[in-house]
C-alpha cells in the first residue's frame, strides 16, 4: 500500500459483486482492483472479460495469500462474512464487508472484538448513509433543524418479482428484517443519535409467496422499536410492490419533520395524459443508490489511506443485526422482545 493507491481484492461476483467490481475498477480514483475470487466458473469468466488485468482466483484463501493486495471487499453470502473477515484481518488485509455483518449476534460480537484487536481496519457497508439526500437530512437534523428528533418511519420495499427468485435466497437471508430492514434500523439509529434499543415488536404476512411460510418468513413485515428517552422507530419491509423499488424515511422532531425519498422516482420526468399525472420508478435498490455505492467505496479507500475515521463503526453493524434478529424473534413468537 502506498499513500496514493489501495490495492484491492474482491470476493463475490454475483449481481451486486459485479457492480462493486466495476466501481472499484473505474470509479474510485485511489483504488486499484488487482484481484477477484469466485467459486463459480461463469463469474470468473465474466471477470476475465470485464476487468482487464485483475488476477482471478477460485479460492478465497489463495487470494488472501496474494502479497499484492492491501484490502479485500466482501460481497459474499452473509453466512460466510464472520470467518472471511477474520481470515482477511489475520492475513494483514483491511476489510470492507457488505451488510449485514452476520446472521448471528454472537458472531457479530466476536468479529467486532477481533477487528478491534487487529492492526488492520474493518467496516461494514450500510450504503444509505452515503446517499447525498440522506446525508443532507442528517446534517439538517444535527444542526437542530427539526428540534429534538424522536420518531423515525423508514421502509424498504421491493418491486414484485413474478418469478419469486428471491424465495430461493430466503433460507439463508436471515428473514425479511435482516435482509431488508437492517438498512432502516441503521438509519434510524444514526438519525436519532445512536440511542440504545429497549424493546421491539414485529408482525407480518405472506401476501404473495406461500413458500416463505415453512421458513418462518414473510413477504411483508412491520416492526416497532422503542429506544431510550422516548425515541421510537417504525419499519416496513415488502417484496410485493407493484410500482417499483420504494425506499423512504421520515424523521419527526419537536420543531419539524424531514422526509427523504417520499416520492420514488427514476428521474424528474412527469407524464400527464388521459391516465393522469405520474412518474416512473426505479426497479431496484441499486438504481436508487448507485451513486452512494461509489461514495461508500471512496470513503473506505480514503479512510484507510489517510488514516481517518470510518463514517460507521463495527458496533453500529452489531447493533443493527441485534435489533433485526430480535424483530425476527418477535415475528415468529408473536411477542415483544426486550433488548
Image (cartoon, helix red, strand yellow):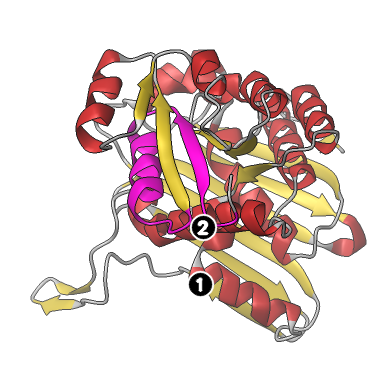
Query: With respect to residue 289, does 82 lie above or below?
Result: above
Residue plotted at (43% across, 22% down): 169
Which of the two residues, 12 or 152, is positioned nearer the viewer here? 12
Q: Can residue 209 be seen in the rendering of this structure?
A: no
Place residue 22 in its image quadrant. top left
Residue plotted at (68% across, 37% down): 324
Q: Is residue 158 left or right of residue 298?
A: left
Place residue 134 in its image quadrant. bottom right
In the image, residue 196 lies in the stretch drawn in magenta: no
**Disc marking residue 133:** 1
Query: Residue 21 placed where, x, y %?
Result: 37, 40
**Disc marking residue 254:** none
Q: Nearer the viewer, mark 2 or mark 1?
A: 2
Q: Could you say whether the residue bearing mark 2 is in a helix, strand or loop? A: helix
Q: Quadrant of the C terminus?
A: top right
Query: With respect to residue 51, does 82 lie above or below?
Result: above
Residue plotted at (67% across, 49% down): 185
Q: Quadrant of the N terminus?
A: top right
How many numbered badges does the structure rendering display? 2
In the image, residue 18 lies in the stretch drawn in magenta: yes
Residue plotted at (31% across, 52% down): 244
Query: Residue 243 placed where, x, y %?
Result: 29, 54
Query: Residue 65 placed where, x, y %?
Result: 56, 19
Question: What range is drawn magenta here?
Answer: 3-30
Please give the residue where the numbered disc 2 appears in the rendered image: 298
Q: Could you say whether the residue bearing mark 1 is in a helix, strand or loop? A: helix
Residue that sits furthest to the right in the current view? 229
Query: Residue 239 placed where, x, y %?
Result: 41, 39
Q: Residues within 10 Å of mark 1 (few under 14, many from 20)?
A: some
Which of the two residues, 124 or 219, is positioned nearer the viewer here? 124
Place residue 332 in its image quadrant. top right
Q: CA distance from mark 2 to mark 1?
A: 17 Å
Amino acid at each position: 500500500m502506498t499513500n496514493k493507491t489501495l490495492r484491492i481484492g474482491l470476493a463475490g461476483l454475483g449481481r451486486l459483486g459485479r457492480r462493486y467490481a466495476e466501481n472499484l475498477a473505474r470509479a474510485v480514483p485511489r483504488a486499484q482492483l488487482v484481484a477477484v475470487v469466485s467459486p463459480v466458473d461463469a463469474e470468473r469468466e465474466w471477470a476475465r472479460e470485464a476487468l482487464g488485468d485483475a488476477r482471478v482466483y477460485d479460492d478465497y484463501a489463495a487470494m488472501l495469500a496474494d502479497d499484492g493486495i492491501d484490502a479485500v471487499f466482501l460481497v459474499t453470502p452473509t453466512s460466510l462474512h464472520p470467518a472471511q473477515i477474520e481470515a482477511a484481518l489475520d492475513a494483514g488485509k483491511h476489510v470492507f464487508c457488505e451488510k449485514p455483518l452476520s446472521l448471528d449476534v454472537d458472531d457479530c460480537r466476536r468479529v467486532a472484538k477481533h477487528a478491534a484487536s487487529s492492526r488492520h481496519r474493518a467496516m461494514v457497508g450500510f450504503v444509505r448513509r452515503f446517499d447525498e439526500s440522506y446525508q443532507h437530512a442528517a446534517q439538517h437534523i444535527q444542526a437542530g433543524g427539526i428540534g429534538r428528533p424522536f420518531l423515525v418511519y423508514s421502509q424498504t420495499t421491493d418491486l414484485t418479482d413474478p418469478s419469486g427468485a428471491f424465495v430461493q435466497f430466503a433460507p439463508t437471508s436471515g428473514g425479511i428484517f435482516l435482509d431488508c430492514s437492517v438498512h432502516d434500523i441503521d438509519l434510524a439509529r444514526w438519525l436519532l443519535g445512536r440511542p440504545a434499543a429497549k424493546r421491539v415488536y414485529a408482525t407480518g404476512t405472506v401476501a404473495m409467496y406461500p413458500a416463505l411460510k415453512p421458513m418462518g418468513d414473510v413477504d411483508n413485515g412491520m416492526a416497532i422499536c422503542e429506544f431510550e428517552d422516548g425515541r421510537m422507530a417504525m419499519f416496513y419491509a415488502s417484496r410485493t410492490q407493484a410500482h417499483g423499488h420504494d425506499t423512504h424515511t421520515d424523521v419527526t422532531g419537536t420543531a419539524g419533520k424531514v422526509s427523504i425519498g417520499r416520492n420514488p422516482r427514476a428521474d424528474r420526468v412527469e407524464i400527464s395524459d388521459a391516465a393522469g399525472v405520474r412518474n416512473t420508478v426505479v426497479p431496484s435498490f441499486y438504481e436508487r443508490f448507485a451513486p452512494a455505492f461509489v461514495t461508500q467505496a471512496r470513503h473506505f479507500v480514503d479512510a484507510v489511506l489517510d488514516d481517518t475515521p470510518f463514517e460507521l463503526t463495527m458496533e453500529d453493524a452489531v447493533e443493527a443485526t441485534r435489533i433485526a434478529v430480535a424483530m425476527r424473534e418477535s415475528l415468529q413468537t408473536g411477542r415483544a422482545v426486550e433488548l
